[in-house]
Structure formats: structure tokens, C-alpha cells
Image (tube, rainbow, N blue to C red):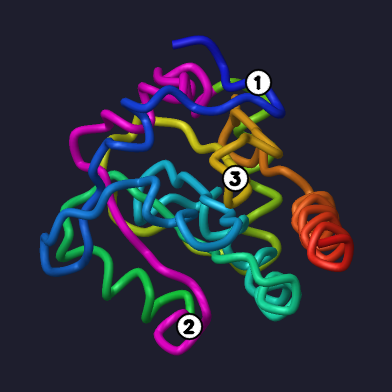
Amino acid sequence: MPIPLIGAALPDAVGASTVLQNDGTQVHLASIWRDRPALVIFLRHFGCLGCAEGVRALTPALPDFERVDTAVALVGCGAPPFIDPFRERHALLFAPVVVLTDPTLAVHRALGLAYGLWGGFRPKSLWEMARSYAAGNEQGPIQGELRQHAGALLMDQTGAVRFFHRSVSVGDHPPVHALVRAAAGIWLERRAESAAS
């Protein structure tokens, strides 16, 4: 599939794709943004050093997403039993974020997220891993598909893509301030529409 276009709807097949909760229960991806906008961060695997860095940067901004009525979900690609240890490791047990997984990689592939070993071992990735280690992040066991790369998708409540990032290396994260700004933009639009009606 081509990379999602800003302002366009995702194909129905993407929203209808299923991801799994920690107990293996299936949920449709689109249910995450059915009632309100949602930021969906796609992880490499649950033990990924780069993802640990990205989650660490995202966590302090979770209250900002709550303030602008935006749901936040993290989608890995390991087995469902990896979810709870991941949440505990990253202090997400009581955080306003849902952690899900797609062991089949169907959603990752449908969104055109990068796949392959090169992105994890290119010189830029090695520098990013060193940076992440220096910041205190840890590499865990491989819990999912090592070759799968990350991404970020912000959807509004109408099902339109408002932000999309396709990571090409281990530490290629969208700036958190850009994600918050995009979510706040949707919130302001909704308030304006509500005031006008």
C-alpha cells in the first residue's frame, strides 16, 4: 500500500484490521479513533532500544494528549503476553495509553511501514543506539519481529489521517512536540465546529 496521505481516509481494510490486547482479544484498529482522535505509535518489537527511547520521550506528553481529548495507543508486534511486562518496564501500568500488538504484521504492512534488517544496522542506527544507551535506555530481548520498523499515525474522529511518520532507522522518532501540536490542532478545529453549530 502507498504511504497514507495527510487528509485522506485510510482504506477500510486498514481500519478493519485487528490487533490484540494482552489477553489475546481482537479489536479493530479503527476502534481506537472511533469516538475521538487517536495517536497510534507502531513499535518495532517490545524489547527494542529505539522504541524504549521513543516511549520515554512520549510519556511526559501523555497528559497533553489527554487535555486535547486524544487517545494514545502503542502497537507492537510480539505475542500478547509481552504487553504487560512492557507496560511495567516503561511505567505505563496506570498511564493513559493502550498497548496492543499485531503479531501478524498485517497492520504494519498495510500502512507501508519499513521492513528489513538494513534500517537496524546502518551507521545512523548504530549512532542512534549509542545515543539511546547514553540516555539510560536498555535493549531488552527481541519480542516480536526484529526487521519491522516503527511509525506513527494520528487519526481524527472522522477517520482522516492527520499525521503520518514512517521510521527508517532505530531512533527515527517523530518529534513529540509535533505530535502534540497536530493533536491540539484537531482539538481546536472540533471546538470551532462545536461553537459554530
Q: Is mark 1 on a helix, strand or loop?
A: loop
Residue at the extreme top: 2
Q: The residue under label 2 is which amino acid type?
A: Ala
Q: Give the range drawn in magenta.
A: 92-121
Tell me, yes or no, if residue 87 can be seen here.
Answer: yes
Left or right of residue 81: residue 43: right
Q: Is residue 48 magenta?
A: no
Please tell me which residue is depicted at 49% across the width and 29% down the height of the picture.
Answer: 120
CA separation in Å, label 2 and label 3: 25 Å
Query: Reading the chain from its start, which is encountered first: label 1 or label 2?
Result: 1
CA separation in Å, label 1 and label 3: 11 Å
Query: Reading the chain from its start, which is encountered first: label 1 or label 3?
Result: 1
Instruction: Name the front one of labels 2 and 3.
Output: 3
Q: How many labels does the image show?
A: 3
User: Are the two marked residues, 1 and 2, in contact with CB atoms closer than 8 angstroms?
Assistant: no
Tell me, yes or no, if residue 143 can be seen here.
Answer: no
Please tell me which residue is depicted at 66% across the width and 77% down the height of the picture.
Answer: 66
The tag on residue 91 is 2
Using the image, determine if residue 138 lies above or below residue 26: below
Please tell me which residue is depicted at 20% across the width and 41% down the height of the picture.
Answer: 103
Q: The residue under label 1 is which amino acid type?
A: Leu
Image quarter in which the N terminus is found: top left
Please tell me which residue is depicted at 74% across the width and 71% down the height of the picture.
Answer: 68
Q: Mark 1 points at which residue?
A: 5
Q: The residue under label 3 is which amino acid type?
A: Met
The tag on residue 155 is 3
Residue 63 screen position, x and y as percent: 70, 80
User: Are the two marked residues, 2 and 3, in contact with CB atoms closer than 8 angstroms?
Assistant: no
CA separation in Å, label 1 and label 2: 33 Å
User: Would you call the spot at circle 1 few (<14 residues within 10 Å), some (14-19), or many (20 or more)?
Assistant: few
Q: Does the magenta stretch include residue 118?
A: yes
